[in-house]
Amino acid sequence: MFSNRHFGWKLAASLVAIALLGLRSERLGDSIHPNLWRCLAQPARWDGTALWLPRALVVASDADGFEIEVQGVRARVAPADRVAPGDTIALTGTFRASGPIQLKLLRKDPPGDESRRWPVIVSIAVVALAILNLLRHFSFRPKVIQVEGRD
């Protein structure tokens, strides 16, 4: 199983398996927490679905609730909370086809907060170091590969 025989086929099968698992997880993730635009496009299908919106901009606020914008799509959220137009928030709630999103939990991001910048930089650095380590210890040398003869 771990020999170099049929290396190309094993590599191709591994890459296909990784691609299929990625597609499957994308579909499962979208069914767990769909995008807001998808919910608004098919409200009957997504009625009662839990929403998680990690980054939304508050565009209007009043005593009954507030309006958010996510990726160019606007939606109403109720009940009202202590938010003002221009605030960036993260929220969880329940999508309702007949009315506003029912708010469950809300978190305000501080102004100018770039909380995702450092985790992304650290993740890229870890991947780069792992690749450099692999290249340092394992190199592809075609002359070293032993070819088994067929009898």
Image: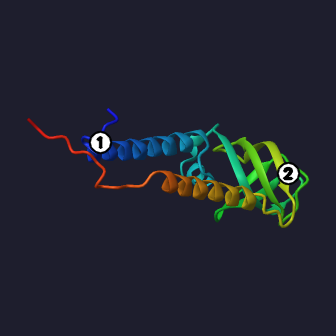
Can you name the residue that lies furthest to the top here? 1
Tag 2's secondary structure?
Answer: loop
Instruction: Work out which residue is located at the far front of the displayed protein and give it.
Output: 144
Residue 123 in view, yes or no: yes
**Residue underneath mark 2:** 64
Q: Quadrant of the N terminus?
A: top left
Q: Which residue is mark 1?
A: 4
Looking at the rendered structure, the kind of residue marked 1 is Asn
Nearest to the observer: residue 144 or residue 90: 144
Residue 95 in sight: no
Of labels 1 and 2, earlier in sequence is 1
Q: Residues within 10 Å of mark 1 (few under 14, many from 20)?
A: few
Query: Looking at numbered disc 2 in the image, what kind of residue is underneath it?
Result: Asp
| Left or right, residue 9 beside residue 108 | left
Residue 8 vs residue 95: left or right?
left
Find residue 32 and report its horizontal and vertical position in percent: 59, 39
Q: In front here: 20 or 45? A: 20
Identified at 50% across, 41% down, the residue is 25
Q: Which quadrant holds residue 93?
A: top right
Using the image, tell me which numbered label, if any, was put on residue 109: none
The image position of residue 100, as x and y in percent, is 73, 48
Quadrant of the image for the C terminus?
top left
**At 82% from the left edge and 62% from the top edge, which residue is drawn?**
113
Q: Report the side of 86 relative to 49 (left or right).
A: right
Residue at image position (53%, 55%) is: 131
The relative height of residue 68 versus residue 94 in the rendered view (above or below) is below
Residue 40, percent from left and from top: 60, 52
